[in-house]
Amino acid sequence: MAANHDDELNQLREQRRIALQNQLEQQAAQQADAEVQAQEHQRLSESLDAAMKRLLTPEARSRLATISLATPERSHSIKQSIVQLHQQGKLSSIMTDVQLKQLLTTQSKSRRTASIRRI
């Protein structure tokens, strides 16, 4: 009878050990995936920054850096738009601050078109 309980206890311990091992393996795989994604994001960010150094004047880069501080997502989409414009051949020379302002106004959600109705 005691041997039967010992066998059950050993079986439960073995099941628990296997479950913990599987859990640790899953966590390690998730962590590795997260690291790969972080490295890919870092590489993409660095390549965009390098492209901005080639495609923008210092004043335009400063403006884009200010936007990045406020809304990083918008800054990222603007950088991608600038790279696309360059790849399409629509941006032949270095983009100035004035040109960047024009691009920003075309991409911004216009607040002037909103109308307010009083009830």
Image: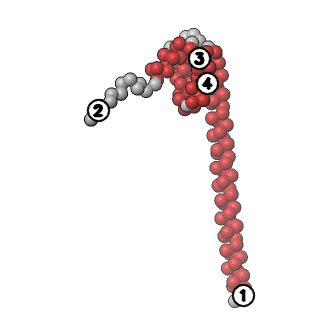
Determine the image quadrant of residue 92: top right
Residue drawn at point x = 59 percent, y = 12 percent: 94
Q: Amino acid at mark 3?
A: Ala
Name the residue tied to disc 2: 118
- Residue that sits furthest to the top in the current view: 93
Rounded to the nearest angstrom, the CA distance separating label 2 from label 3 is: 41 Å
Residue 89 in view in this figure: no
Residue 78 in view in this figure: yes
Q: Amino acid at mark 1?
A: Ala
Relative to the observer, which residue lies in front, 5 or 74?
74
- Location of residue 105 in the rendering, given as x and y in whole percent from the top left corner: 46, 20
Name the residue tied to disc 3: 60
Rounded to the nearest angstrom, the CA distance separating label 1 from label 4 is: 72 Å
Rounded to the nearest angstrom, the CA distance separating label 4 from label 3 is: 9 Å
Relative to the observer, which residue lies in front, 54 or 104?
104
The answer to whether residue 64 is left or right of residue 109 is right
Rounded to the nearest angstrom, the CA distance separating label 2 from label 4 is: 39 Å
Circle 2/circle 3 CB separation < 8 Å: no
Say if 117 sits above or below 24 in the image.
above
Work out whether mark 4 precedes mark 3 in sequence or the reverse, and give the earlier one: 3
Q: Amino acid at mark 4?
A: Ala
Which mark is on residue 2?
1
Which mark is on residue 65?
4
Circle 1/circle 4 CB separation < 8 Å: no
Badge 1: how crowded within 10 Å, few (<14), some, or many (20+)? few
